[in-house]
Image (spheres, helix red, strand yellow):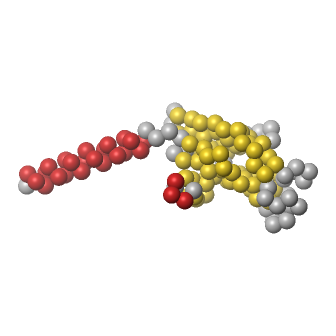
Amino acid sequence: MKRFLTAFVAVLLLSGAYSASASAADPVIYQTARAIPTKSGEFVRITVYAKHVKRVAVKVNDLPRRKATRFGTGCGKKRCSKWRIYTPRTPDEECYELEISGSRGSAGVALSHTVCEPFPDGSI
């Protein structure tokens, strides 16, 4: 019984230490983003990669700041989350200026980044 109790207390202490270190992780927004035109060609889907972030807001080409939607994980072994936002496509320009901000609790992070469409003629 003493062994079981000792093992149980050790597991509780280790799990508490692990959760404390995980919650102390700072939010990160990676300097990688993708801009893919939609099939209609009217909009572009911008994908932003972040880690340890609960909310992401993106300002594209001086348009009002909007919330991004989380839709999956990526980044391979880094296990980051993918966030997407749709914005009107500018036919004359292939690149978009992004001002990205993310937050988790009281901690926040911001990043300015330029993302370009991979297909110069607008084809999909």
| x, y percent for residue 1 | 7, 55
Residue 77 in sight from this viewpoint: yes
Q: Residue at x 59, y 36 (%)?
A: 109
Q: Is residue 39 above or below residue 80?
A: below
Tell me: 52 left or right of 49.
Answer: left
Q: Is residue 107 above or below residue 121?
A: above
Quadrant of image for the C terminus: bottom right
Q: Residue at x 75, y 44 (%)?
A: 114
| x, y percent for residue 14 | 28, 47
Q: Tell me how many marks there are.
A: 0
Q: Residue at x 61, y 57 (%)?
A: 71
Residue 44 in sight from this viewpoint: no
| x, y percent for residue 122 | 86, 61
Tell me: 64 left or right of 121.
Answer: left
| x, y percent for residue 24 | 43, 38
Q: Quadrant of residue 121?
A: bottom right
Kindly give the residue lying farthest to the left in the view shown.
Answer: 1
Front position in the image: 52 or 75: 75
Tell me: 92 left or right of 97.
Answer: right
Q: Residue at x 79, y 55 (%)?
A: 117
Kindly give the residue lying farthest to the top in the view shown.
Answer: 106
